[in-house]
Image: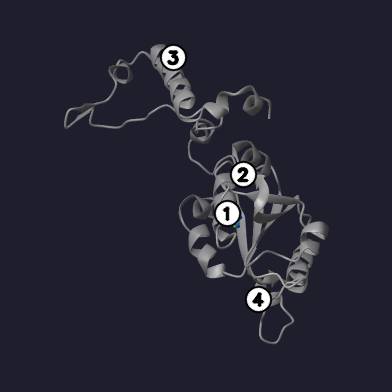
Amino acid sequence: MRIDIITVLPEMLEGFVNQSILLRAQNKGLAEIHIHNLRDYTLDKHKRVDDYPYGGFAGMVMQCQPIDDCISALMAQRHYDEVIFTSPDGEIFDQPMANTLSLCENIIILCGHYKGVDYRIREHLITKEISIGDYVLTGGEIAAAAIADAVVRLIPGVIGDEQSALSDSFQDGLLAAPIYTRPADYKGWKVPEILLSGNEAKIKDWELSQSLERTKRLRPNLLSTDANNE
Ligand code: ADE
């Protein structure tokens, strides 16, 4: 899978995509992540990529030309399944969306900034708008990083034990059960007896009942009919 991220803050993302799971995925040849500095595409001699909004509104707006030229240059090289724009007014990012995106061959993520992007870009080039939650970030870079991370770790082979991505919280619509490691007794804080019993069937039952109990208590919305029908 190939992810092209377009940003005015490439330094902010470079460190992130060259660490940990994302680095491992790239080293294994399972993912390619390319970061493009939007300023490299502007025709403005001062390297500006934004301008004042028509209508006298406050703030600055990302202009069409550099974004169009960058996306067009990428699209001339390969087909993209999605051209994503990170924005607080997008569809809320969740595990099912990450699963769907992980099946894509190539995606572009355009990081929003300033007051937003000229609406014509959203009308003509963007195929999907994604928000990572109902709050406003200064820019879309953190959202792009979250999307890239959640999606790339789902590509088969990226995480050593594939089971571990499948047993994440949310994969079956439930929160994960509590998990423990050695020692079994730390300062009197004990690991549940059942996990030390070696009885696999009973442990599986315990895991499911814990998942259900935690989901009911912490995220009851995940158990509602609406969430299950989505
Ligand atoms: N840009 C600013 N806020 C955002 C959010 N909540 N999600 C995605 N992109 C954003």
- For residue 205, the mark is 3
Figure quarter occupied by ligand 1: bottom right
Residue picked out by circle 4: 39
- Given the image, on which type of amino acid does mark 1 rest? Ala
Residue drawn at point x = 16 percent, y = 32 percent: 187
Q: Position of residue 125 (x, y in %)?
A: 79, 59
- Relative to 52, 208 lies left or right: left
- Mark 1 secondary-structure assignment: helix
Give the mark nearer the N terminus: 4 vs 1.
Answer: 4
Examine the rendering and report whether any part of residue 160 can be seen: yes
Question: Does residue 204 lie above or below 190 as drawn?
Answer: above
Residue picked out by circle 1: 143
Marks 3 and 2 close (CB-CB < 8 Å): no
- Given the image, on which type of amino acid does mark 3 rest? Asp
Mark 1 or 3: the one toward you: 1
| Label 4 to label 1: alpha-carbon separation | 20 Å
Mark 1: few, some, or many residues within 10 Å (few <14, many ≥20)?
many
Marks 1 and 3 close (CB-CB < 8 Å): no
